[in-house]
Image (cartoon, helix red, strand yellow):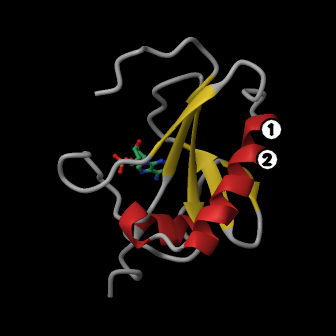
Amino acid sequence: NEKMDCLFCKIIAGEIPSNKVYEDEYTYAFRDINPQAPVHVLLVPKKHMKNILECDAETAAHLTDAVRALAKIEHVDENGFRLLTNCGQHGCQSVHHLHLHLLGGKQLSEKMD
Ligand code: AMP
């Protein structure tokens, strides 16, 4: 079962500890264990889905709402931030539960690959 072995499902369930930043009925956000910027938060839907290709419109809307809340909480709404999701092999996706990386807190590089 894909879900039973899923690291982020276990984090959402509280079976594996995480540094929680935000939570609502549909989403959960926590600090990346290996931060690439002063602000590096992972935002995940509570419902398991492999990647953005499996994301339904309703979940996408919940994620957008959470991004807005998170940007305020992390104080990156003024200066801006980067939001990205890796998908599949070429995207270097390593955890197969959809997650959005929210990066900020400094001037980020123009280079994206
Ligand atoms: P990706 O490579 O896009 O699939 O992103 C996976 C991210 O999850 C990486 O940035 C990892 O540093 C992060 N990560 C892996 N395990 C954990 C964990 N237990 N807690 C927080 N972040 C994690």
Tell me if mark 2 has few (under 14), some (14-19) or many (20+) residues whose alpha carbon lies within 10 angstroms of its own.
some
Q: Residue furthest left?
A: 89
Q: Is residue 33 above or below residue 100?
A: above
**Residue 50 visible in this rendered orientation of the protein:** yes
Q: Is residue 83 above or below residue 14?
A: above
Seen from the viewer's position, the closer of residues 81 and 8 is 81
The residue depicted at 45 percent of the width and 27 percent of the height is 36
The residue depicted at 48 percent of the width and 55 percent of the height is 99
**Residue 51 visible in this rendered orientation of the protein:** no
Q: Are marks 2 and 1 in contact (CB under 8 Å)?
A: yes
Tell me the quarter of the image containing the C terminus: top left
Percent across and percent down for residue 68 are: 75, 45
- Residue holding disc 1: 73
Q: Secondary structure at mark 2?
A: helix
Seen from the viewer's position, the closer of residues 64 and 29 is 64
Question: Is residue 64 shown left or right of residue 32?
Answer: right
The residue depicted at 35 percent of the width and 58 percent of the height is 95
Question: Is residue 29 shown left or right of residue 97?
Answer: right
Report how far apart the C-alphas of labels 2 and 1 lie in the structure: 6 Å
> In which image quadrant can residue 50 be found?
bottom left
Disc ID at residue 69:
2
Percent across and percent down for residue 22 are: 74, 52
Q: Is residue 88 above or below residue 77?
A: below
Question: Is residue 19 shown left or right of residue 70?
Answer: left
> In which image quadrant can residue 78 be found?
top right
Q: Residue furthest bottom?
A: 1
The three-letter code of the residue at mark 1 reads Ile
Seen from the viewer's position, the closer of residues 58 and 50 is 58
The three-letter code of the residue at mark 2 reads Ala
Tell me if mark 1 has few (under 14), some (14-19) or many (20+) residues whose alpha carbon lies within 10 angstroms of its own.
few
